[in-house]
């Protein structure tokens, strides 16, 4: 079967750094993506890693280790508006995007 | 940038009726579109892959006769929830893969804003 595991909830304070981990087991792998979703909204693309290493986009960075089937999303200088759900997602051998279980991030003042 | 329009954004219907949800790629062609369902505080679950000009491919456990998918053109896919019941109440989201006939694994995927369906 296919599975992507993430912590269910993470809480951090404004201005801090938080890391959300994702481990995956899928039939085929064509990259790891991260999406943000606010309550009631659609998922918004954040980043994509096809190769091992770190990708940086402003306050957000994403890391991938294909040998470990593991990746993480790093959010720096947390802001209140970052409170949302974050999903990792893998493109499998059929090019379908399979989503992880999701992590609810709560940023406190 | 590429935009996917999903309509309606919300709908309330009575049990037993059918509801059609449209997903349009506004400024690009999409041979493949995906339909997801999301229950409150849960992940997005892939329901089916919609292919232009051919039958949709449904994920295991999804009833194809209940969730009818039509992808008649390169810019439009529709999902019809037939004989809806309260347990079908959910957030339905479509996504479209950018690219006509030249689709590759890294072709961008664009999401609609979702449709919240409530069946009373």
Image: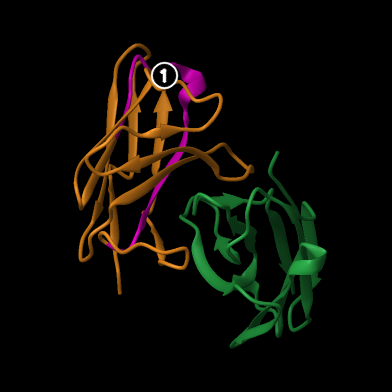
Chain colours: A green, B orange
Q: Position of residue A98 (x, y in %)?
A: 58, 50
Pointer 1 residue: B120
Q: Position of residue B52 (x, y in %)?
A: 25, 44
Is A17 displayed left or right of A60 in the figure?
Answer: right
Q: Residue at x 33, y 45 (%)?
A: B9
Front in this rendered view, residue B107 or A106: B107
Instruction: Say what secondary structure mark 1 lies in.
Output: loop
B95 magenta-colored = yes
Q: Is residue B28 above or below residue A97?
A: below
Q: Residue at x 74, y 78 (%)?
A: A14
When asked about the image quadrant of residue B12, the answer is: top left
The quarter of the picture where the C terminus of chain A appears is: bottom right
Range covered by the magenta-colored residues: B79-99
- Pick out the residue farthest to the left: B73
Q: Residue at x 65, y 65 (%)?
A: A83
Front in this rendered view, residue B16 or A74: A74
B51 magenta-colored = no
Front in this rendered view, residue A109 or B104: B104
Q: Residue at x 30, y 64 (%)?
A: B102
């Amino acid at each position: 079967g296919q599975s992507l595991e993430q912590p269910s909830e993470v809480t951090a304070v404004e201005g801090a750094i938080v890391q959300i981990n994702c481990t995956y087991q899928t039939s085929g792998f064509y990259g790891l993506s991260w999406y943000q979703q606010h309550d009631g909204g659609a998922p918004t693309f954040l980043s994509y890693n096809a190769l091992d290493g770190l990708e940086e986009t402003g306050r957000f960075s994403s890391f991938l280790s294909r040998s470990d089937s593991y990746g993480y999303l790093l959010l720096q200088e947390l802001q209140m508006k970052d409170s949302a759900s974050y999903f990792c997602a893998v493109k499998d051998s059929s090019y379908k995007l399979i989503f992880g279980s999701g992590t609810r991030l709560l940023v406190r003042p | 940038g590429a935009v996917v329009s999903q309509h309606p954004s919300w709908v309330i219907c009575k049990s037993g009726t059918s509801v059609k949800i449209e997903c349009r790629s506004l400024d690009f062609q999409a041979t493949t579109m995906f339909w997801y369902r999301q229950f409150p505080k849960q992940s997005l679950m892939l329901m089916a892959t919609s292919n232009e000009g051919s039958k949709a491919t449904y994920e295991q456990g999804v009833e194809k006769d209940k969730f009818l998918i039509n992808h008649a053109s390169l810019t439009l896919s529709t999902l019809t929830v037939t004989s809806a019941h309260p347990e079908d109440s959910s957030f339905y989201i479509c996504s479209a893969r950018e690219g006509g006939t030249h689709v590759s694994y890294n072709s961008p995927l664009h999401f609609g804003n979702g449709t919240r369906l409530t069946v009373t």
